[in-house]
Amino acid sequence: MTGLSSGAERGRGVSPRANASPTIVLGLRSADATQEWTQALSEALPHARIVTDSADAPAADYAVLWRPQPGFFARQPGLAAVFAAGAGVDWLLTDPTLPAALPIYRIEDGGMAEQMAAYCAHEALRFHYRYDRYEAQQREGVWQEWPYVSPARCAVGVFGMGKMGEAIARALAALGFPVRGYSRSPRALVGIECFDDSHGLEPFLQGAQVLVVAAPLTPATRNLFDATRLAQLPRGAFLINVARGDLVVEEALLAALDSGALAGAALDVFRTEPLPREHRFWTHPRVRITPHVAAITVVSESARQVARRITQLGLGEVPSGLVDRSRAY
């Protein structure tokens, strides 16, 4: 049997055939990431040809991308599918050069859900047990004990119940927090109070002393947490954003923090990254910042996912993880 059809052949209407010798082009942000993905894909698909995006790169069958250099799709017009090299595809869907019919696959978990659940559990526990106060007291030389409050009295709301959100919700429930989850469509999860669009967002927010934002960035979620939405949280609530910075209106969040309506925020994602040095988040006493590290792509696991899906596509099967462009995830 011959190898997979070239990009040029697919441009003439020839579909990829079952074979273990695809050409995969990498369009990644750094030389280190390119090297790591090259090694991992070579181990997962030993007979694949792995190339790096460049003006003279050969026509490829598939691409693994993370914010590639401008002109990528013009250089590779015959791709059969694209695989995002991390969580989220909002950056890809807003690329005006993205071919309209090109299938896009997202990483499902890829070792990131466990990291994100741990990050959110840490921040929720830190808020609930007043560790920020104890840290401040240490700096001031103050010895003061605060009363114990059971986690059962601190409800946590997880907005976005995909694989990441579900892992976060389960981890927090295991720590004794009452957990409510919000998803676009109805869900039923043992031990989790489930809300969806039929309930509306306000009842969900009104019962969340801690709000975890874990949904993808879509036209429906962009700027969703504005002054109106943040005001629907209980006074003194705490916000954790591990999704995308554009879900939260920064000016509204700062105003809520300044007024005391919100007790604090732990932010891992921002509208502009890296966060500009002059931004108020850096110095705000009620804001904790991390540099988009709540869930770092585990390349070995992610490469195995890509390899499995390429094999399935070559066999004419339908892999999981296909992005629904109408939903933007």
Image (cartoon, grey):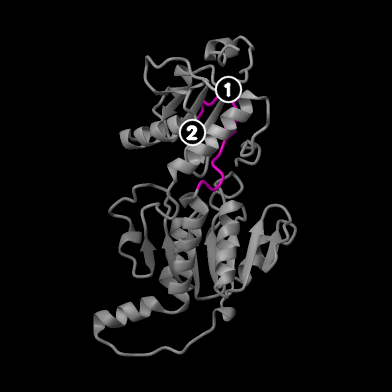
Q: Mark 2 belongs to which amino acid?
A: Ala
**The one of 278 and 55 positioned closer to us in this rendering:** 55
Write down the quadrant of residue 327 in the picture.
top right
- Is residue 228 something one can see in this rendering? no
Disc 1 versus disc 2: nearer the observer: 2
Residue 71 image position (x, y, % from top left): 43, 22
Q: Residue at x 40, y 31 (%)?
A: 38
Name the secondary structure under disc 2: helix
Q: Is residue 79 above or below residue 155?
A: above
Name the secondary structure under disc 1: loop
Q: Earlier in the sequence, mark 1 or mark 2?
A: 2
Queried whether the magenta region covers residue 106, the answer comes back as yes
Q: Mark 1 belongs to which amino acid?
A: Ala
Q: CA distance from mark 1 to mark 2?
A: 19 Å
Queried whether the magenta region covers residue 116, the answer comes back as no
Residue that numbered label 2 is attached to: 44
Residue that numbered label 1 is attached to: 80
Query: Which quadrant: the C terminus?
Result: top right
| Span shown in magenta | 93-110
**Neighbours of disc 1 within 10 Å: few (<14), some (14-19), many (20+):** many
Main SS type for the magenta part? loop
